[in-house]
Amino acid sequence: MDKNRRQFIGAVAAGLGTASAISADESKQADPISSKFQPKERWEDRMQAPNDGKKYGWFIDTRRCFGCHGCEVACKAENDVPLGHFIRQTFYKDVGEYPKVARMFLPMACQHCEDAPCIKACPCGALHKEAGGTVAIDYNTCCGHATCVEVCPYGAIYIDPVAKQAVKCHNCYHRLESEMEPACAATCPSEAIYFGDLNDPNSKVSKAMADAKAQDLEVTQLRAEKETKPRMWFAGPAAPEVEDRIPAEGESYSTETYNIHTWKGT
C-alpha cells in the first residue's frame, strides 16, 4: 500500500472516530434527563415492587371535580405539609368566550410511574417501590440531592425547606396498612378521585374506569410520551386542556399558585 493511500485511509478512520464521538455527545445532549440516571445496577432492585399481587393506581373523573381543593387540604393535614408547599395540587383553566365560558379543574399528584425516572436518578437510593408499586422515599436514606425533582415529568416532588429532603405523594401507605383510602380520595365530596388495586376488578378504581369505558368516555394519561408508564388516568376534557399548566422536569408545584396577585389573567 503506497504512502498516500495509507494517509487517506487513516484520515477517513480518524474522521469516522470523530463523527462517532460527536454523535455520542449530541445524543447525550439531546436526552439530558437520562444523563442524570444512575447506573442500572444501582436502581434495578429498587424499581421492583414487592410481590404482593397488587397494582395501585388512580382514576380522576375531571367532569366531577369542581375545584373545592378539599383533596389538597386533606393531604396537607394528613401529611403535615408545610405552608406554601404541596404534595398534590388542583390546576385550573378558564376556557370558552363570554357568555359561554367554563372553568376546568385538574387534580394532580405523583403518577407512581412503573418506570419511575426519580428512582433511576436518586443517587442515595432513597426512592423505591413499596406495596402495590407505590413510589416512596426512605427518609433514613434521603440526602436531599434533588435530582429526583430534576427528572420528574410531572413536577410532583419538592425539597422540604427544613428537613432538606424530597417529599412526594406516597399513596398514604400508612392509611392503606389500616385498610383506609388515601386522605384525598376519602375526602373528595364530588367523588372525582378514585384509588385502588387495578388488579382487583371489584376495587373502586377498577369499577370507575370500567364505568367510564362503558359510557364510551375517552380515558387518557398525561405525558404518556415520556414512557414512564404512569398509573393515573383521567376522564373528561380537563386533562388535555390544562396540561400546559402542569409543571415539568426541574419544577415543583408553585408556592405562589394561590397568591392573590396571580389571579389576574388566569
Image: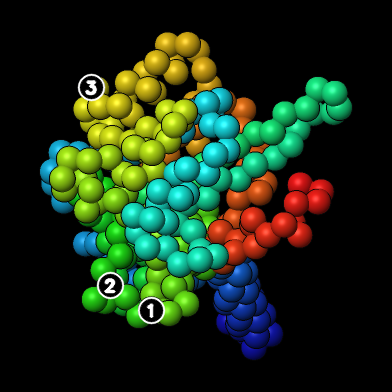
- In the rendered structure, the answer to whether residue 14 lies left or right of residue 176 reads right
Secondary structure of residue under mark 2 = loop
| Location of the N terminus (image quadrant) | bottom right
> Residue shown at 56%/25% (left/top)?
63
Q: Position of residue 94 (x, y in %)?
A: 74, 37
Q: Which residue is mark 3?
A: 202
Q: Does residue 171 sit above or below 208 in this rendering?
A: below
- In the rendered structure, the answer to whether residue 55 lies left or right of residue 256 reads left
Question: Taking the image as drawn, is residue 257 in sight?
Answer: yes
Graded by Cα atoms within 10 Å as few (under 14), some (14 to 19) or many (20 or more), the crowding at tag 3 reads few
Q: Quadrant of residue 27?
A: bottom right
Q: Which residue is mark 1?
A: 163
Secondary structure of residue under mark 3 = loop
Between circles 1 and 2, the one closer to the viewer is 1
Graded by Cα atoms within 10 Å as few (under 14), some (14 to 19) or many (20 or more), the crowding at tag 2 reads some
> Residue shown at 54%/39% (left/top)?
68
Q: Residue furthest top?
A: 215
Q: Does residue 209 sit above or below 254 in this rendering?
A: above
Say the numbered circle drawn on residue 246: none
Q: Amino acid at mark 2?
A: Tyr
Asked if labels 2 and 1 touch by Cβ distance under 8 angstroms, the answer is yes
- In the rendered structure, the answer to whether residue 31 lies left or right of residue 160 reads right
Q: Which one is in front, 119 or 260? A: 260
Q: Position of residue 2 (x, y in %)?
A: 63, 85
Q: Which residue is mark 2?
A: 139
Circle nearer the N terminus (3, 2): 2
Q: Residue furthest bottom?
A: 3
